[in-house]
Structure formats: C-alpha cells, structure tokens
C-alpha cells in the first residue's frame, strides 16, 4: 500500500477553493486518489476530504500541514488537519459490565478490519477482565468509591494512562460513568459514545424502559462524540429496529444490543478512516 | 364474502379464558376464521381478536355483544367490542393546506383498498377544496379567526357534522389545529393523527427543523391516537428514513412527506380492519 | 430562482480534470452552486455533476455544450450533457389498470413537487381514464388486439405522440406491456420502470407470488431504466419491507403497492433533477 | 425458573383444535404461560406453540409426547414435538476461515444470551483455532484433500463426532464446504446456514461480486435451514443494508459481514427458543 496523506478541511465557502486546493496538490506532484467535498448551502460552508499519494510529492510530510496552513488558513479562514495512512490511531476502550460492544470491537480489531492499535481497556469493574485477557490487551480497573470521593484521583490516573499510551481517541463501549470535563477537553470530538436510544428520544438512564413505557414501535441506537452536555454531542451514526407490543423491556435490551454494537463500530470505522468532520455540533461523514 | 362478526376483547389474564371464549363460539356453531391472542406477561393482561362466520351462528347479531358481556364481562373483568364485516366505518378527514396525506387516503379509498365510507372532508382553509372536488367528496371549511374567538362555534359546527354524518372515526391528515377536548372525549382513541417526527423526539412544531438542528441521521413519522396531551397518545405505527448531513430542512420536508402518508395510511388500515386494541396508552396491533 | 446550467459528465479518470473543468466555469464568471464528483476506482472512471449560475456567465447558453465538448470531449474521452434549470422535462406516463403509482405521480405533480410537465397518459385499457380526467391530463388508449397483430401500428401511434408532445422521458407506472425495441432505442436510459420485486430476485411475472412461494421474509421494489433485456436495466432505486409467514400473496400485493409508488417516484425525482448518470448498466446517483 | 414443557405442533386446520389442546393442558393442571397459533388460510393448516409449567402437571414429562400423540396425532393428522426448558440444545459450529460470525456466536454464548451448549467447533482449516482456544472450545480440523478423495472419510469422522457429542443442531458460520446428503438427512431442518445475499438473488458463489456487477442499491443476508438443494432451504431470517454506486466488492464484503452475523444469530436464537416450525419449505416463526 502506497503511503498517502489525508487532509480534512473546512472553511466558509468561496469560489475557487476546490480548484486552488487540488491545484496545490497536483502542482506538487501529488496523485489525488480521493476527493470528496460538500458545501452546506445554508451555512455557506465548505467541507473537503482529500487523499493523495506521497511517493513523488515535492513537500516533506512534516511540512505539509504548515504549508497548507500558510497558503489557506488565513486567506480562507480554513481549518486544516493532515493525517498519514501509515500512522495507526491509538484507541482506548472504556467499558463497564456488558460484553457485546467490547467483543464486537475486539473481534474486528483481531480480524484486521481496522488500521488501529488498542493498547488498553479501562473499566470501573472487574467483569470484563476475562475478555481483555482473551485478546491479550492490558486491562485497568479503577473503582469509583460509592461516595465518589476518589473520582478526581481516578480521572488523574486515567489521564496519565491516556498520555503514557499516546491515545488518539477513546471509545465508550457501554461505559456507565460520566466522563469528566477535563478528559472531554483533552479529547474534543475524539471520545465516541454509544447511547442505547434513537436520540434525542430517551436521553439519560434506562432508555429501553422509557421506550417500553411510551409504547414506541421502533427502537434505535446512536453513536456520538461526547461533549459536556449529556447525550447531546454530534451524532455520528444511528440505526433502528422494528419492535411490537409483544416486546418487554428485557427483549428490547436484547434487540438493542445488536444495534448498539453495530452502530458503535460503524462510528469507530469512520473515525479511524478520518472520514468525519464536525461543525456546529453536527458531523459531516464522507463516504 | 361471508358475513362475519369480529370481537376485540381484553381482560386480566386467567387460565382457561381462551378455551371458554372459543368454546362459546364453536358451541353456537360459529366458524372461527381468525383468532389471535396476546398475553402481556408484565401487565398479566390478555388481548384477543376473533373473527367468525355468522351464517350458522345461533345467536342473533344484535344479541352477540350482550351475550358475551353477560357471560364474560363481570366474571373476567373483560372489555368486549363487537363489529360486523358488513358495517363499513365512516371516516372523516381533517386537513389543512398540504395534499400528500389527503391524496394518499383518497387514492386508496377510490381504489377500493379499504372497506370504509368518507362522507366529508373538513378544513380550516380553502386550499384542499380542489382535491376534495376531484374525488367528489363534500368539503367543509370553517376558518378560525385570528383571535380564535370563534373557536367554540367552529367546534360546535364540526361536532354537529360528525353527528349528522354518523362518523365512526376521524383522520387528521396534517391538520394543523389543536383538537378540542370535547371532540376527543366524543371519539376516544378514534382520532388518528400523523406527527412528522419519530415520537417522542421532536414533539410540537417544526419537527423537521428540530431534526436538522440536532443533526440526526434518521428521521421518522408517527401515527397515533389523539389524547388530551399533545403528541402523547397511543402510538399505532412508526417508520423512518435515513438522511445525511447533505439534507436541508427543505429536503427533510420532502423525504418526510413519503413517510407521513405511508405511516398514516397504515394506521388507518389497521383501524378500519379493527385490529387495534388500546390499553394504558399503548396499542396492541393484531396481524 | 436564478437561471442555472447543469452539466453531467464522465470520462476515464485523469489527474487535473476537476481542476480544469471547475476552472473553465470560474474563469467564465460562472458561480458554481453544486459540485459533486465520484471516481470509480475499479473502472478508473470519473463522474461529475456541476450546477452554476448563468447570470454573469460569459458563454451563451446555446454554446455551452459545444464549448465544453471542444475543450474536453476528445482530450479526455469525456461524455458531456448540459441542461438548464428553466427547461422543464416533459414526461409521458404509461399505465395499465392499477392506480396507486399513477396517483402518486400525479399528486406530486399537482402539489408542485417536480419541475416537470405531463402532457399525456398512455394506456392499453380504459380503466385509468377517470384518474387522468381528475387531473385534466389527456388520456390515450391503444388496445393491443389479443393476437397482437396491431402491435406495430400501436407503437407507431405511440411514437408519433411522443414526438408530437416532445416527450423527454417516459415513466411506466405499472404498465403491463413489453416496450418495443424501437421505443427503447429512441429513449435510451430515459424510460423508467417499476418492477415489483427486489431485483434480480423474481424477474418476470407475478413476483409477489414467487416471493410467497419461496417464503422470503422481506419483499422489495426496484425502479430501473428499461433496456432490451427484461428487468435487467440499470437500477435507480430499491426499497424493501419486512413480511412474515402470516402474509398471503394478496397481503404482499397490498404491502408492495406502497413500496412501488415510493420507489418509482424517488427515481422520477432523481431523473427530473438530472442527478443520474448511467455507465456499464449501472447508475451513479448524485445527492 | 420454573421447569416448563414446550409443544410445537401443526396439522390441517379444523374447528375446535385449539380448545381441545389447551383444554388437555388445563385439565391436567398445566399452567399455560405461552400460547401462539397461526392458521395458514391458504394451506388450511394450523401451527401452534404452547409453553406450560410442569410443577403441578399430572402427566410425567417422559409421557407427555406419547399422550399428546395418542390424543391428537391420528385424530387430527397432527405433527407434535415436545421440548423441556431445562434441556439445553447442543450446538456444533462449522466454520472455515472468517471470524465474524464465529465471534458473534461465541460472544453471545459467553455472555449467557442463549440456553445452549457448544461442545465443539469443526473446520476444514486451522485458521479459527485461536478463536476456539480463546473461548476454550475443542476445535477439530479435517482438511479436505484437493481431489476431495477423502471426503467420505471426513464426513464419517464428523458424523461420529456429532453422535458422540449428542449434537442437536448445527450452525454453519460461513462454512465454505458443501454439506453431505447424509448429514442433512440426519439433521433435517436442524442445520442453519448463513448465505451472504438476499436469497433467492445471487445464489451460489461470490454473491457480493454478483451484487456489485448487477448494480443493486441494497444488499442482504439470509439464514436458512440446509436442504439438499443449494441455498434453497426454508428461510428463517433476512435483513438488508442500503449501499450506493460508491461501494466496491470489498466494501460490500465489509458491510455484509455485519448483516451476516446478526442474521445468523437471530436465526440461532429462534431455533434455540424452539420458535420455528417448518412446513412445505417455509418457516413459521413465533414471536
């Protein structure tokens, strides 16, 4: 596989930006293998994803971001990120007591479906240690005391681990604790959560019981980036399944599990492939 | 088509009820052609729908409900309704300014898809008169004055019409006015509304704009019986369609129209077929 | 609404084409309001759709296609089509005896959902004349004699009508006759059919009965461009609905109707918006 | 959990059967906790599933089947099967080289989602041994020689293992070998396969490539019981996912994996719960 650069960029829309950006890459002998752009005609904002081969590219990879910023950042009020295909993101998994999302993530990882490293799994319970052991991934438990008095200490330890392991993004695989504002601030739009409802319906605790009480005919699951407001971050992916009056809260939990794991893993896939841009609490998802 | 009786009944679950009810029909020479029952194991409540041919049935049709009530109502705290296949329900349509649901209802009616009569269409605007004329259905307009001072008078006129036309149930085909408590009380769980969101998400006005603002990846529509609480009645049917960041409020409105008309018509079909039981603000829908 | 030009083009993929094409428009003072392109990395083929405002555009609209052809056609082996936003396509509907697709098309037309004219409806039966009359659209019936001896004559008459009415594309709204090769040749990838199955399953007659016999758990509908091979042309849109063992061929027909009309109308929408490119018996559908 | 008996039965439909069968259980002091029946009005055939508590039941569990047969089998031409809630079915998994379905099955098994035992995993390749080891399940490999000369010998060994392990049903988790008629005969409608297409479309090899070639807009997966005819056995469950012209055969394979594992596991769930009846190459699936 050829080494490639990936640029994600967005800015207020103006004539000629696409021509100029693609021209910059072509002129420097980059072979563009992926180009997708989208103009939000309401916000008048342009979003773009480019991928090009680096073999004959005249600019050194460590200079690409600077070069693009100096050319476009100020001129177009453009936000640019640059990634490289040979840099595997490092993903931390947070989990509590349920195994279905964790298994789904690890099975894909083991099958080589993702270009990602998973250096650690973090939990507030011992329950999932066996699963981590099955896959040979270090498992860290920090229990939150009932009075939550050790919370700060735990978060400090978690953040030290994230730093030590050079974690690029975090996946909450049905992790039943609130994430601290500090951790969110360190990983802005880089913490992916799965909420077991079709958001914004049934925010908060026990969504399947809420769905049962309301008598809905369809349930859903939602993966989103974590922000400071509960279950209100940018939505990455949703899916649904039809239910009926015959379903109980227990059967909803079972049906929902399949949704949760698939919807979470789809979001993780898009994140790993650097195909998500966030803007004004929404996501732009490239194909 | 053989003349048939349809019984919808529900009661606290007890051993032997199914045996006893089916026995009653068989013993009186009724040929059961449809039997579906469902036990809600959480509420411990039994729901049942029966359909049998009347040709050789020993009980006169005007006595069936009384007979079943005298046998079962007190003994089992059973709620019984009896309908007959040759009694076409009479449906009134309320509409405001949008034609998509109205056309869908009338096209099915004209195609003979439903065993129903539609003696009138009611509106607060003139806009849909042409459509009513196309199908030769009387169209009544009562405009609500800006200060809503004539509201009571309008409702009185509407109720008189419902009475005169012996309306059995009402369909709100994107009718943008609040239904009065009096009308709801006269048609308990017999007024079907279509709400253009996946309830309980986006209750109230402009749900597509709310969906756009929230950045959801799927939108829905919900048909439900009208109760005194806004958009909170028993849900009959829901469906959804996938959207993307490329959708604008306008494109959501267009995509949503197809959902709305299909989801409303599915609910109307079930209602006409007497396949819906309501219990504790939920529906049991028989196949 | 500003007058706009729309270009649909495709060619073998090469570096710099996007830059060059967008450059051509920008240089001539065209304001690009829509740009979407897609590279098929397997076929190494580029597909592109552009829309730009004509107000200040330096090239006269009657010269645009020539200009683009002279610049790109030979150089890039590019296929170019140019349309204008103020040219409403003229659509002919062919129908047999079922009204659901016809009503869905006409209701959208009447509601102003489409920028299209419908000068005529053609049938081999009288059944749908009432519906055409409801909407005030001329209805032409040519009956095919049982021995099909008048077939050539009928086709001749139909083609004369198409010509006289300057028909741009044809929609088969459950039209149960084979379309002649001549008509197909005159409207290559401009005749849209709805097949009532999830193609390529259940090609040919009575697909719902075939689906019932096979015991599938989901049924579908497929809209596609008509080619000389039965039910084998480029697929535009498909959708499905879940069924169960409780469904009969009759209930499948009813459930399928809703699919058919929605799937057909979605295809017509995309065609009218000039958002479909065909290549090697497949479609590229722009958003 | 109370010990319960489960009866699955079907027979030509006649008046009074439900009354008689439920009467038999009630009379013998069985407390019915589940009753679902379905009458195929075309085949005029009755299907029924009953579950009742055995605590006070007057008939010994080893005599129930005989008793029901003597009462109903001849009288109604009824086919009766009886199971007990405390008898865990024993499931064998056959797998080749892909892990996604295998992981999904084993993760559910480990999470306690199913009342089942998995005594062995059989393969024609070594690839999945690691996964079996992760879960501590014996893994047997019998390689088929290129000339297939050892086929009979392998099948003999497999059947001996099935017998020794008292296997009740077999799950083919993307097992890429033809199952012998002998094994099928020994497990009639007790071998569950997952086919990676929306059957009957794309029977046989490489369905994703076939789907890509045909240009479909939706792909599917189908779980079915294995019969002597390839991919033609009774369908248990199907599901689909929307694709677009942007998908390649490779991306279809990835999207399809999620379908395959979910659709296979749903079928396994229904089989374990004894909620499937087969009749005339179709399935009746109870809720």
Image (tube, coloured by chain):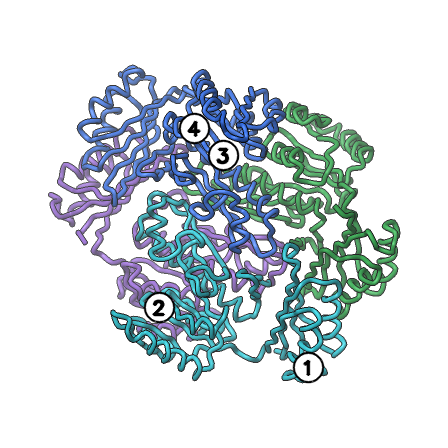
Chain colours: A green, B purple, C cyan, D blue
x%, y% of residue A81? Answer: 79, 52
Mark 3, chain letter? D
Mark 4 Cα within 10 Å, few/some/many (few <14, many 20+)?
A: some
Please name whichever residue, A235 or D254, is drawn nearer the observer in this view of the structure. D254
C264 with respect to C20 (left or right) = left
The N terminus of chain D lies in which quarter of the figure?
A: top left
Residue ID at (41%, 72%): C93
The mark that comes first in sequence, 3 or 4, is 3
x%, y% of residue B82? Answer: 23, 47
Residue located beneath label 2 in the image: B121
Label 3 sits on a secondary structure element that is helix
Label 4 sits on a secondary structure element that is helix
Residue located beneath label 4 in the image: D272
Mark 4, chain letter? D
Disc sitting over residue C55 in the figure: 1
Residue located beneath label 3 in the image: D265
How far apart in space, not on screen, are marks 1 and 2 (Cα)?
A: 46 Å
Nearer to us: label 2 or label 4: 4
Residue ID at (71%, 81%): C57
């Amino acid at each position: 596989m050829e080494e490639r650069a990936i640029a994600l960029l967005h800015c207020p829309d103006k004539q000629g930006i696409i021509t100029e950006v693609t021209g910059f890459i072509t002129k420097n002998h980059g072979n563009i293998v992926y180009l997708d752009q989208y103009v939000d005609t309401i916000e008048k904002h342009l979003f773009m994803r480019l991928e090009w081969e680096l073999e004959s590219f005249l600019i050194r990879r460590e200079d690409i971001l600077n070069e693009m910023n100096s050319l476009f950042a100020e001129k177009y009020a453009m936000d640019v990120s640059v990634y490289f295909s040979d840099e595997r993101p490092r993903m931390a998994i947070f989990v509590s007591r349920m195994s279905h999302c964790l298994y789904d993530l690890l099975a894909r990882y083991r099958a080589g479906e993702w270009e990602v490293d998973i250096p650690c799994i973090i939990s507030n319970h011992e329950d999932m240690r066996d699963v981590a052991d099955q896959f040979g991934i270090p498992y860290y438990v920090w229990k939150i005391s009932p009075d939550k008095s050790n919370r700060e200490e735990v978060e400090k330890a978690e953040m030290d681990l994230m730093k030590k392991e050079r974690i690029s993004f975090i996946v909450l695989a049905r992790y039943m604790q609130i994430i601290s504002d500090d951790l969110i601030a360190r990983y802005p739009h880089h913490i992916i959560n799965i909420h077991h409802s079709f958001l914004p319906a049934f925010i908060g605790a026990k969504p399947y019981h809420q769905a049962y009480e309301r008598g809905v005919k369809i349930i859903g699951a939602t993966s989103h980036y974590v922000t400071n407001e509960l279950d209100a971050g940018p939505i990455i992916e949703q899916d649904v399944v039809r239910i009926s009056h015959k379903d109980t809260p227990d059967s909803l939990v079972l049906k929902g599990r399949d949704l949760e794991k698939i919807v979470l893993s789809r979001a993780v896939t898009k994140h790993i492939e650097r195909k998500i841009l966030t803007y004004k609490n929404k996501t732009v998802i490239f194909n």
